[in-house]
Amino acid sequence: MISRDLAAELARAGLQWRPAAGDRFVIPQPELTGEVFTLSEMTIEAHEFPTGTVLGFNGTTEWALDSVAQEDALWLPREDQLRELLGGTFVRLESVERDGERTWVVTTARAPGAEEHFTAATAADAYAHAALALVRAAVGASGD
């Protein structure tokens, strides 16, 4: 799972979240630090309203929380979701060992012969860094 900081960076860069079953998220409030929630038809559902998406907590008696607006939650994309986001730019994922330390390298190419490499301690973080570069490039290109 990627860190909250990296997830926040992706959100600030413009990554859009369309809540679906299996998605993980946190609610950035001090009293909920360390709590990771998972969308599920049984316990937490995304409800679409004209005013926006609300994440409803079904029957969660231990929490004084009935629902939270989507914009008040922080999505923690999974490795497979990040890989899917990379789409055709994804070239490969490699595990590399250097000086006894294992790192992961995601290679992307937005143009032929223009490979970029993103290295992190976990495969999910390497994918997240690659996705961040892609989102920033897309947002920058649409903002010109």
Image (tube, grey):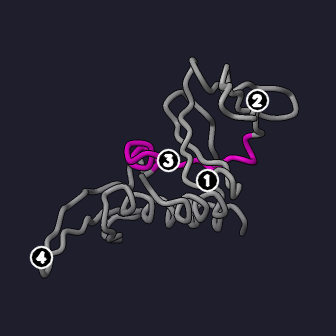
Estimate the spatial distance between the alpha carbons at disc 3 and disc 4, rounded to whole Å.
29 Å
- Helix, strand or loop under label 4: loop
Rendered residue at 53%/27% (across/down): 21
- Helix, strand or loop under label 2: loop
Frontmost residue, 43 versus 7: 43
Give the number of the mark in front: 2 or 4: 2
- Helix, strand or loop under label 1: loop
Residue that protrudes farthest toward the bottom in the picture: 99
Give yes or no for contact between labels 2 and 4 (Cβ–Cβ under 8 Å).
Answer: no
Q: Earlier in the sequence, mark 4 or mark 1?
A: 1
- The label shown at residue 15 is 1
Q: Is residue 122 left or right of residue 9?
A: left
- Quadrant position of the C terminus in the picture: bottom right
Amino acid under disc 3: Pro
Frontmost residue, 132 versus 124: 124
Task: Judge the density around disc 2: few (<14), some (14-19), many (≥20) Cα neighbours within 10 Å.
Answer: few
Q: Which residue is mark 4?
A: 100
Amino acid under disc 2: Asp
Q: How many marks?
A: 4
Q: Is residue 124 left or right of residue 77?
A: left
Rendered residue at 61%/53% (across/down): 15
Give the number of the mark in front: 3 or 4: 4
Q: Which residue is mark 3?
A: 77
Main secondary-structure element of the magenta-colored stretch? helix
Q: Earlier in the sequence, mark 3 or mark 4?
A: 3
Q: Which residue is mark 2?
A: 66
Give yes or no for contact between labels 3 and 2 (Cβ–Cβ under 8 Å).
Answer: no
Give yes or no for contact between labels 1 and 3 (Cβ–Cβ under 8 Å).
Answer: yes
Amino acid under disc 1: Leu
Rendered residue at 54%/44% (across/down): 36
- Helix, strand or loop under label 3: loop
